[in-house]
């Protein structure tokens, strides 16, 4: 597999915000252009796709989390992928000269077209309880997102704990090999012989980020997209007003605070 699958989702204005957002961000990734609808003036970012590797996902079980803060027993999504391996694509938005951000981390599971979107959830989460622009996402406090199997992510958690914040482990070195970047993405084994995971910089940094599951006409998973909410979409009820003054500096992520950056 190389190119991401096409999308043929039929949406209605009455659909929940999250489903409209999922189709919109995926279309932007495939088209290679992301528009920021919350900007004072129209802003369009070029989006580059990079195949960064392939993941083994036994039983089709998937965890998405900030590996630095996810805890010792990360919860997998209740939705199974229907495949035990998938390619990983980093979608980077070109914000300016020499400045890129990871807009989304994508799992390419199958070749068939995306016909509908499902919100990825863990045990105990019910999409029916969400209102307006509500969504379920995973918390990020170290500026990092990831995909991996449950066992692989447990290994990552242990390795990072044993590293004690020194950032000398393979995951941190893969992310920070060229310094504190904003566009890092790699598939890396957390220790010799371990099952690899996919890790990346998370959009603008810390926050809570949802994962959208694209399914085909038979309900089979074809793509999985963690959306780092880099820009506002056209379906947001409350678009950000134009800034009259320069916005306050974003708080430093835990990872950047560790580094003193």
Image (cartoon, rainbow, N blue to C red):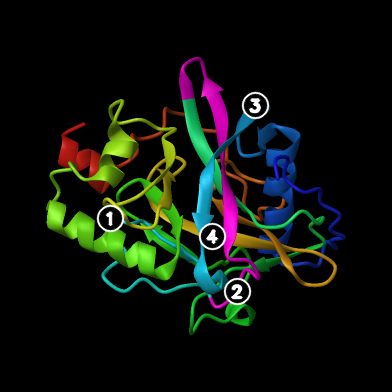
Q: Nearer the viewer, residue 34 or 29?
A: 29
For marks 3 and 4, the one nearer the N-term is 3
Q: Quadrant of residue 225?
A: bottom right
Residue 228 visible (yes or no): no
For marks 3 and 1, the one nearer the N-term is 3
For marks 3 and 2, the one nearer the N-term is 3
- SS class of the residue under badge 1? loop
* Residue at which label 3 appears: 46
Q: Residue 210 got which mark?
A: 4
In the image, residue 223 above or below residue 215 = above
As measured in the structure, the alpha-carbon distance from the residue carrying label 3 to the one carrying label 1 is: 29 Å
Q: Residue 68 got which mark?
A: 1
Location of residue 80 in the rendering, given as x and y in whole percent from the top left corner: 60, 74
Figure quadrant of the N terminus? top right
- SS class of the residue under badge 4? strand
At x 17%, y 36%, the residue is 259
In the image, residue 204 above or below residue 57 = above
As measured in the structure, the alpha-carbon distance from the residue carrying label 3 to the one carrying label 2 is: 32 Å
Residues in magenta? 78-99
As measured in the structure, the alpha-carbon distance from the residue carrying label 1 to the one carrying label 2 is: 24 Å
Q: For residue 91: magenta?
A: yes
Answer few, some or many: residues within 10 Å of disc 3's Cα (few below 14, many 20 plus, some between 14 and 19).
some
Q: Nearer the viewer, residue 96 or 73?
A: 73
Q: Residue 198 got which mark?
A: none
Q: Are marks 1 and 2 in contact (CB under 8 Å)?
A: no
Answer few, some or many: residues within 10 Å of disc 2's Cα (few below 14, many 20 plus, some between 14 and 19).
some
In the image, residue 96 above or below residue 78 = above
* Residue at which label 2 appears: 80
For marks 1 and 2, the one nearer the N-term is 1
């Amino acid at each position: 597999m190389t190119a991401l699958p096409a999308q043929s989702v039929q949406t209605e204005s009455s659909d929940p915000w999250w489903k409209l957002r999922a189709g919109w961000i995926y279309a932007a990734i495939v088209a290679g252009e992301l528009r920021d609808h919350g900007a004072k003036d129209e802003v369009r970012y070029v989006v580059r796709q990079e195949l960064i590797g392939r993941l083994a996902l036994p039983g089709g079980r998937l965890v998405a989390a900030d590996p630095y803060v996810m805890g010792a027993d990360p919860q997998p999504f209740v939705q199974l992928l229907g495949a035990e391996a998938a390619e990983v694509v980093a979608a980077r938005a070109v914000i300016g000269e020499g400045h890129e951000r990871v807009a989304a981390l994508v799992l390419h599971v199958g070749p068939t077209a995306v016909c509908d979107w499902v919100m990825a959830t863990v045990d105990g989460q019910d999409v029916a309880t969400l209102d307006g622009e509500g969504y379920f996402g995973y918390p990020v406090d170290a500026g990092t997102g990831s995909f991996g199997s449950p066992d692989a992510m447990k290994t990552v958690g242990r390795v990072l704990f044993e590293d004690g914040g020194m950032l000398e482990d393979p995951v941190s070195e893969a992310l920070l090999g060229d310094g504190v970047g904003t566009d890092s993405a790699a598939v890396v084994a957390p220790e010799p012989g371990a099952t690899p995971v996919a890790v990346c910089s998370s959009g603008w940094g810390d926050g809570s980020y949802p994962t959208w599951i694209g399914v085909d006409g038979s309900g089979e998973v074809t793509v999985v997209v963690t959306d780092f909410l880099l820009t506002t979409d056209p379906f947001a009820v409350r678009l950000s007003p134009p800034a009259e003054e320069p916005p306050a500096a974003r708080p430093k992520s835990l990872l950047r605070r560790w580094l003193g950056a």
